[in-house]
Amino acid sequence: MKTISKYYPLLPVLAVYFIMFLVGKNVSGMWQLVAMLLFYCALGQAFNIFLGMTGYVDFGYVAFMGVGTYGMAVTITQLAHVEGLGFLVITIGFLMALLFSTLLSLAVGAVALRLKGAYFAIATIGVNEGLRFFIEGARIWNGSEGLIFMAELNQILGRKTASALATFWADIMVLFIAMSAAYVTLLFMRSKIGYALTALREDEEAAKVMGINVTKYKIIAFITSACFAGLLGAASWALKTPYVFPPEVFEIHYTIEAIIIVLLGGAGTLLGPVIGGLIYGLSKYYLSIYMPGFQLLIFAPIIIVIIVIFPEGIIGMLKNRFKDTSLARFII
Amino acid sequence: MALLELKNVTKEFGGLVAVNQVSLEIDSGEFVGIVGPNGSGKTTLFNVINGVFFPEKGNIIFDGVDITRLPPFKRAPLGIGRTFQIPRPFSSATVRENVAVGAMFGTLSKKVNVDDSLEIADQIIDRIGLHEYTGKQAGTLTPVEKKLMEIARALAMKPKLLLMDEAMAGMHPNDIDQMVDLIKKIALEEKIAIVSMVEHIMRAVVGMVEKVIVLHQGSKIVDAPTKEALEDPKVIEVYLGHPPEETHAVS
């Protein structure tokens, strides 16, 4: 009984995803929107593991999605001529995405995680921009011309399967990544890792003198978060749109969106990034339909107002409100 | 053998010598007060002992192990606990979770899991008398409650040595007496050596410590049993200036 009740907080998360899936599948013309929302929810959940749990702001977060996208793209272009691999190529692509994002996060983490606050944030912007110009300048993976692998994907999977992958199955993979990120977040929260991360987020020096190896736990959160970003890049960017250009995948805009989603929903909460992703995605979508061109102008003050009214995010606020009620065990 | 031994420890910040050639010994279970005016190097000395700063010169030996170059997170599990002058709670976590963090990471045992830690936390919270606040967010406590919580958090680490940084500052005299009694009782039971830093509140020192170490401009000037130390002319000079000679002549 106790082991099951441990997983109660996952229920609202899964419920939201289930409803999204049903709406997307059954209401015609909705799948595009649902796919976008799933992407934002997954992005928020992946980033929350680092930003929300450690309190460190990584402005170069999108770089992990970028290298993940390249991991998948490079695998597909390299293995396209090998006969009979089929879906194995996609699996290898995901593994390469994991490998690339792990390596990058280790390299960045080992250096940048020694810095604190604003210094860390600035250093990570440098990493993102540096990586982009390095790939372009050194002409790695075709440099600024990018990789276009529509033909290769068709060759590997067949035209029909490749198209089904781009329009449906890639989104299901994003959904799966989002749910895995939620599960890992809960595991962290319930383990020593979560306690260590909370302690170092609140007061790093006090955490150190209480015996917490803060660097170790920061790196654990950093790598985990980066891996999910890599997978997300591979699924949502490489498989959905079979091309990759450096300026698009190292676009800092996505990092900012991820930060907004996490703060809006509630940094460090389990359900927060899902709600944040929903609100952000929906408002972005409908504002761009009804007031095209003005969406950012309208969106900015809305975000400011929400963050002023609920500094702990929407779920952070609900968590405090329902603290001593039976709802408390579902909202964390 | 002494529990903590400092040998000629020097810590400099640029040209400023914050701790100058300090040697001292603390025995296990001993209650020691570190006394000295503002800027005399007390906090730096604490930070050198628990590893926030590494000394330029000298050695620190704790429980027979040279810990001079050990980072703080490795020193804490050896048995060095610490409370801060201005409490530093993990604000968003509850009191129970705060104390559990101490039990989880502050001991050498790798087997303490989350559930065990929470149980240990409950016991300690009961002992300190913070029972009614256990589910409250630490950031919402009053300063006195935060101080008690910090002590509970440090005790959860099962320390052999507890460094208390001006723990009584800003407290009501009644609260001070209560807290001194409580700390003394627990420390005696657990055989914890306590090094308490005192800037202003002498009554807390006198009531609690057996030995006083007086720092002045980074150097140790007195290291003696409490009564003796407080009557030492050097201490009086540091705190009150030169005694007027004429008064002596008249009387």
Image (spheres, helix red, strand yellow):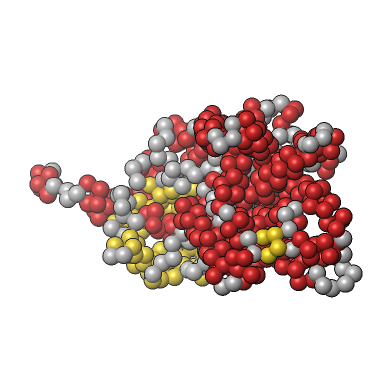
Frontmost residue, A234 versus B124: A234
Classify residue B20 by image quadrant.
bottom left
How far from the left and from the top, in percent, is residue A263?
58, 40
Q: Is residue B129 above or below residue B225?
A: above
- The residue depicted at 76 percent of the width and 71 percent of the height is A78
Q: Residue at x 87, y 55 (%)?
A: A160
Query: In the image shown, does A93 or A229 lie closer to the viewer?
Result: A93
Horizontal relation, residue A312 to residue A32: left or right? left
Quadrant for the C terminus of chain B in the image: top left
- Please report the residue visible at 79 percent of the width from the left and 71 percent of the height from the top: A79
Q: Residue B17, position in %: x, y?
A: 30, 63
Residue A135 at x, y percent in the picture: 58, 68
Above or below residue A134? Residue B199 is above
Q: Position of residue B50 (x, y in %)?
A: 48, 59
Q: Is residue A23 left or right of residue A304?
A: right
Q: Residue at x 31, y 52 (%)?
A: B39
